Amino acid sequence: MLVITADQVGSRGGADRAGSTLEELNRRFGNELVLPVDRNAGDEIQVIAPNGTTALEIILTLTRDGNWSVGLGAGAIRMPLPHATREASGGAFIAARSAIVRAKKRATRFAAEAQSEYGTRPTGATAADAEAVIDLLLTLRARRTEEGWELFDGITSGLNQNEVARKLGVSAQAVSSRAKIAGIRIELASYPALARLLDDLDLANNEHQNAEESA
């Protein structure tokens, strides 16, 4: 499992988004999560993602509008799990805490860290690998126009390009051109590989943790 910690950008001067964002994430991903998305002190929220696919979807949801800094943590999570995410602990939470500190200073507002409770580094996929590749995707998304996002939302809702064209009142050729400029197909094609990378990161740290505990 992977831990995501998110902190609202500019919370002191703006509306509190933590409550509404927490509700949205629980509505969209609640059936996939081992515990509900939770709120820490202030405007910070935490998620335990069961796999790379869910972790990636949540990261992309939180980073889309620029209102959140997002830290991803890989490492051990103490078992058994408590009744609430905010009561859970372990190396993955420490890593997510470290990541969110860095994320606030980065252009993409995202960072990833991995931590073993025993302090040594695992082999296999690393947090730096995940951070570097997700940075590329977030940079592509940051350049997308409002029209590009309209098209993205239409395609990811299950419509084909002709149906999206009719919905937006433009030609199929215009939709095809917009999709290319917005990099939508490139983004969607990257999801399985990125999810596998996050799964590998999780597995590498958990296998490393288990090996140290049995040594």
Image: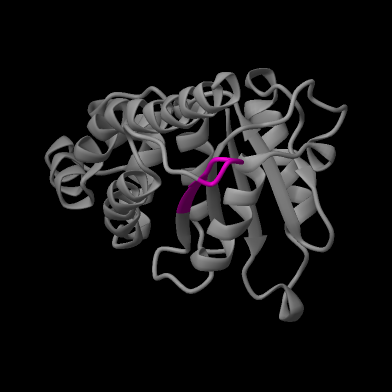
Return the residue nearer the eye: 175 or 197. 197
With respect to residue 112, does 81 lie above or below?
above
With respect to residue 97, does 37 lie above or below?
above
Q: Residue 71 in the image: state x and y as whole percent.
A: 54, 53
Magenta span of residues: 112-119
Q: Residue 17 in the image: state x and y as whole percent.
A: 73, 59
| Residue farthest front in this picture | 215
Q: At 84% from the left edge and 39% from the top edge, which residue is drawn?
A: 87
Q: Is residue 23 left or right of residue 101?
A: right
Any part of residue 148 in sight: yes
Any part of residue 69 in sight: no
Return the residue nearer the eye: 112 or 40. 112
| Residue farthest bottom in this picture | 13
With respect to residue 16, does 92 lie above or below?
above
Q: Residue 210 in the image: state x and y as whole percent.
A: 55, 22
Q: Quadrant of the C terminus?
A: top right
Q: Quadrant of the N terminus?
A: top right
Q: Is residue 192 left or right of residue 15?
A: left
Judging from the image, the colouring scheme is one colour
Q: Quadrant of residue 28?
A: top right
Q: How many marks?
A: 0
Q: Quadrant of residue 130?
A: top left
Q: At 11% from the left edge and 40% from the top edge, which residue is drawn?
A: 173
Q: Residue 48 in the image: state x and y as whole percent.
A: 65, 33
Q: At 36% from the left edge and 51% from the top edge, which residue is drawn?
A: 131
Residue 107 magenta: no
Q: At 61% from the left edge and 41% from the top edge, which residue is drawn?
A: 117
